[in-house]
Image (tube, helix red, strand yellow):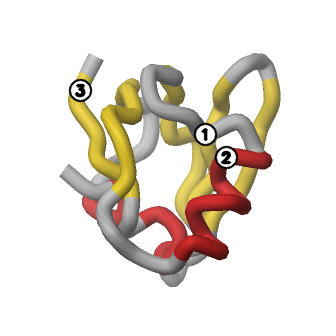
Amino acid sequence: MSLDQLTVATKWRVIGFQKGSPDYRKRLLALGVTPGVEFAVSRIAPLGDPIELRLRGAAISVRKGEAQILILEKC
């Protein structure tokens, strides 16, 4: 499942990344979105972009375009 299909207050684990822009992948890795990390969707903007995630004790926002390269599983 990709992050752009998720709902608020659900918990997920990152399994990996789809092939896509290496720039998006680097940005997500720099923000702490690494394979194996668990997160919760805390907010979604009214138009669906950006999406706020809670992971590793911090809140981060990612754009839909960045989120679409994530491969996820439900916790």
Quarter holding residue 24: bottom right
**Labels 1 & 2 near each other (Cβ < 8 A):** yes
Q: Secondary structure at mark 2?
A: helix
Q: Image point 68% across, 60% down: which residue?
A: 26
Q: Is residue 70 above or below residue 50?
A: above
Tag 1 residue: 33
Q: Which label lies toward us, 1 or 3?
A: 1
Q: Nearer the viewer, mark 2 or mark 3?
A: 2
Q: Looking at the rendered structure, which numbered label has been put on residue 72?
A: none
- The first of marks 2 and 3 along the sequence is 2
| Residue 31 placement, left or right of 6 | right
The mark found on residue 74 in the picture is 3
Residue 19, how many percent across, how many down?
A: 33, 69
> Which quadrant is home to the C terminus?
top left
Q: Nearer the viewer, residue 42 or 72?
A: 72
- Which quadrant holds residue 70? bottom left
Q: Secondary structure at mark 1?
A: loop
38 left or right, relative to 54: left
The dot on residue 29 is 2
* Amino acid at the residue labelled 2: Leu
Q: Position of residue 41 (x, y in %)?
A: 50, 40
